Image (spheres, rainbow, N blue to C red):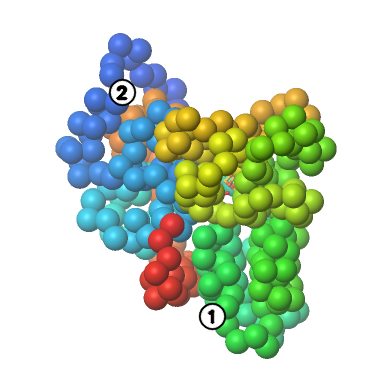
Amino acid sequence: MNISKATEQLEQNGYLNLEVDAQIDLFAEIEKLKKEKNAIVLAHYYQESDIQDVADYIGDSLGLAQKAQSTNADMIVFAGVHFMAETAKILNPSKKVLLPDLKAGCSLADSAPADLFKAFKEKHSDHLVISYINCTSEIKALSDIICTSSNAEKIIESLPKEQKIIFAPDKNLGGYLNKKTGRNMLLWNGACMVHEIFSLEKIIKLKIRHPEAEVVAHPECEEAVLRIADFIGSTTQILKYTATSPANTFIVATETGILHQMQKDAPNKTFIPAPPTNNCACNDCPYMKLNTLEKLYLCMKYELPEITMDENLRIAAKKPIVRMLEISRKAGLIG
Ligand code: 13P
Ligand code: SF4
């Protein structure tokens, strides 16, 4: 869908200027709307705490795609970013899929423009394309298999050792996977602005002050940070690790929204967000944090903004996603 055009339309209709009565209980209203509309609220761990608390399901990218595939709800309200809601729509063309803020994009998805990627792929026509789910549906349509940080290793291992592979769009995740699997995948030069901002120097200083702390990191982080991590995994895998590890203090190198569930799962443990290079809140994803409880309520009430897709593109993008879900199911992987 053309996001700027759709946003312009919402602006013209006055939708973007709607205000929420400060007196209403948003939690109760959202619950009411869920029942009235047979809606499900899916939220990523990077969403603000209130949204996580009102969601029917919280998960990583794989878990969210699996839930979107299996739900019986008529309406999927996606508290996440655009590529996640689009994946839900690709899997559910007849359901209404809503995203509270259409501008909730992704710097990683933006780092792979479809025309440039198509030319790159044509130059390496003997390669299969594995794309990280954090990409546009145009890139998905140019891919053979999609993966997430939860299943990437299994997806790569499902291909013969000698198979040439292009991995896109995240060069950090791709580099990490090359090391883990012993492959030599050709990497697209994309990255996530949130995971590239962590300061190795500041993390090391924190480690000196908290020698007992374990460093946990998402594989979208740069290699230097991954090298000093005690555990590397998807958001769901990191959560499982911090809840079960005997350690009591963790330095967390991923988006700060995850701390909410970490603290809920292990209230007596201490979680320190890994510091960014400067003094900004750059380890908050500016796209994920565009969604608010107010916007979630408005979006359910007015059933806007809705994710729409060209049908040919949807069909082409669906194939590599279904292939991923199939491999994950056979491997017993749940996000
Ligand atoms: P996972 O949800 O796969 O852990 O990925 C994190 C992320 O950056 C999502 O945008
Ligand atoms: Fe994209 Fe990074 Fe934000 Fe995830 S954290 S949505 S990869 S910009």
Q: Position of residue 28 (x, y in %)?
A: 24, 25
Confirm if mark 1 falls within 8 A of ligand 1: no
Residue marked by disc 1: 158
197 or 247: nearer the viewer:
247
Q: Please tell me which of labels 2 and 1 falls first in the chain.
A: 2
Above or below: residue 307 compared with residue 142: above
Quadrant for residue 180, please give it.
bottom right
Q: Secondary structure at mark 1?
A: loop
Find residue 56 and report its image quarter: top left
User: How busy is the neighbourhood of tag 1: few (under 14 within 10 Å), some, or many (20 plus)?
Assistant: few
Q: Rate crowding at label 2 as few (under 14), some (14 to 19) or many (20 or more) other CA atoms within 10 Å.
A: some
Q: Residue at x 72, y 60 (%)?
A: 171
Q: Find residue 209 and report its horizontal and vertical position in percent.
A: 74, 29
Q: Residue at x 70, y 32 (%)?
A: 210
- Circle number at residue 137: none
**Residue 37: x percent and y percent?**
20, 41
- In percent of width and height, residue 283 lies at 65, 35
Locate residue 242 relative to residue 299 in the image: left or right.
Answer: right
Q: Three-letter amino acid code at disc 2? A: Leu
Is residue 171 at least partly visible in the picture? yes
- Residue 56 left/right relative to 242: left
Q: CA distance from mark 2 to mark 1?
A: 45 Å
Q: In the displayed structure, would residue 124 be above or below residue 228?
A: below
Q: How many marks?
A: 2
Quadrant assignment for the C terminus: bottom left
Q: Which residue is mark 2?
A: 26
Picture layout, residue 68 above or below residue 16: below
Mark 1 residue type? Ser
Task: Note whether residue 80 is visible.
Answer: no
Relative to 154, does residue 112 appear above or below in the rendering? Answer: above
* Residue at the top extreme, as displayed: 23
Residue in the picture at 39% in, 25% down: 294
